[in-house]
Image (tube, rainbow, N blue to C red):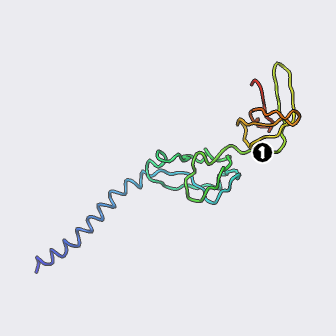
Amino acid sequence: MATGTASRMSGTIRPLAGLIAMLAALTPTLVRADMLPVPAMTIRPGDVITESMLTERAFPPGYTARFASVVDAGQVIGKSARRMLLPGNPIPYNAVSEPEIVKRGVAARLVFEADGLIITALATPLQSAGAGEHIRVRNVDSGLIVSGVVQPDGSIRVGVP
């Protein structure tokens, strides 16, 4: 009878031991998990991301090596969402950009400056852009299309820097 009890117990203990071994193998993985900033709410395209819109969530180790995701909230706070960001999902690098200062089709000031000479004109941007981005604009007076860099004040600088 003792032999039958022992075999019944070993039949119960073996699966339990396997479960314990599996849990022990998973525990270090959970400790090393990558903590990434994720939206706490739905962030729509054009929304400027604030700290209150973000939270952190654990992802498997090496997640950022496989997927180009933001690893620090400071990388996205103050930036504009280029597409919808869903709660709990990692934020891809290409899903955020500088907030748009210049809007496509909305008149902006075009500035050329060289050797003390400053020429300004009115231009229509052919695309929306943030500060520091290169864009193409159409000069309202001449109809010429030129390229320039969006300045923090919303003007577009053309010509020699």
Kindly identify the residue that appears in the image at 32 percent across and 58 percent down: 24
Location of the C terminus (image quadrant): top right
Residue lying furthest front: 143
Vertical side of 67 occupied by 44: above or below: below
Circle 1 residue: 104
Of residues 142 and 18, which is closer to you in this image? 142
Residue lying furthest right: 141
Vertical side of 28 occupied by 134: above or below: above
Of residues 89 and 10, which is closer to you in this image? 89
Residue 104: x %, y % from top left: 78, 45
Kindly identify the residue that appears in the image at 19 percent across and 74 percent down: 9
Q: Secondary structure at mark 1?
A: loop
Q: Residues within 10 Å of mark 1 (few under 14, many from 20)?
A: some
**Is residue 152 toward the left or the right of residue 94 in the image?**
right
Kindly identify the residue that appears in the image at 23 percent across and 70 percent down: 13
Residue lying furthest bottom: 1
Residue 155: x %, y % from top left: 81, 36
Of residues 108 and 47, which is closer to you in this image? 108
Q: Amino acid at mark 1?
A: Arg
